[in-house]
Image (spheres, helix red, strand yellow):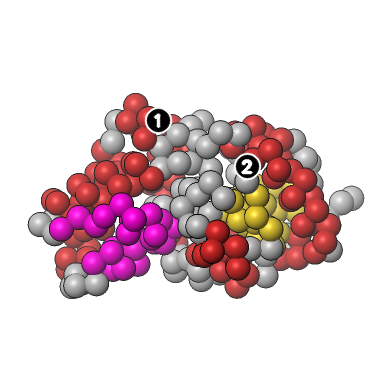
Amino acid sequence: MAELKLVVFDVDGTLIDSLAHIKRAMTSAFDACGHLPPDGAAVRSIIGLSLPEAMARLDPSLNDAELRAVVEAYKDSFNRSATADVQREAPMFAGARAALERLNAHDALLLGVATGKSRRGLVRMMGVHALEGMFVTTQVADDHPSKPHPSMLEQCLYDTGVKAKNAIIIGDTSFDMEMGRNAGFGTIGVRWGYHPDEILAPHSDVMIDDFAALDRVVADLLEART
């Protein structure tokens, strides 16, 4: 029997193009709490981090109470969005669903998620895009330190029984890649996300331009690591 392999995906910027949705929720949250909203470039740079870490980077002047208030306002704005708005502002990237379905067709290959989203946010996004049942392990910011701490990926290994040498993380930010390195995973960086090559590539074993390349790169990287 073949050893089990594990491929873990980041969500925002990797599977789902949620930048517009996140920007709108950020603007709403900072406005609601009486603070100057961050610009788009700043928001783009923190996507993938857990909310408290992200908010603190966006506005280091926030005290603890203000930070908690902005985080809660963001969650409220994000989760109150109409399903039609989420589908329009946070679509899946081209080829993402087909790639997931192809990988899922391999009996010895398990799929997981490691995201800076809350559990509620992930469940909402998976429901909007009909991704329920696609992943055997889903790790969220509610239960772990922020990326790049390896806790999320360590839990993925525990849940599946897969060894780190047989595991890969796929993501669009240096936070994802550093988390992967910290957990002993192989790392695949995607060029369609939110961190540019000069930030992402130094932490990635392999970089890919589209989902069509994913199957071959996953197979080659797993083989090279065994």
Residue holding disc 1: 87
Q: Nearer the viewer, mark 1 or mark 2?
A: 2
The quarter of the picture where residue 91 lies is: top left
Camera-side residue of 143 and 54: 54
Segment tinted magenta in the rendering? 36-59
> SS of the residue at dot 1?
helix
Residue in the image at 39% along x and 59% along y: 45
Q: CA distance from mark 1 to mark 2?
A: 21 Å
> N-terminal of the two: label 1 or label 2?
1
> SS of the residue at dot 2?
loop
Residue in the image at 59% along x and 37% along y: 96
Camera-side residue of 193 and 60: 193
- Categorize mark 1 by other alpha carbons within 10 Å: few (<14), some (14-19), many (20+): some
Amino acid at the residue labelled 2: Asp
Residue 103 position in % (x across, y down): 71, 40
Whether 204 is among the magenta residues is no
Whether residue 83 is visible: no
Majority secondary structure in the magenta region: helix
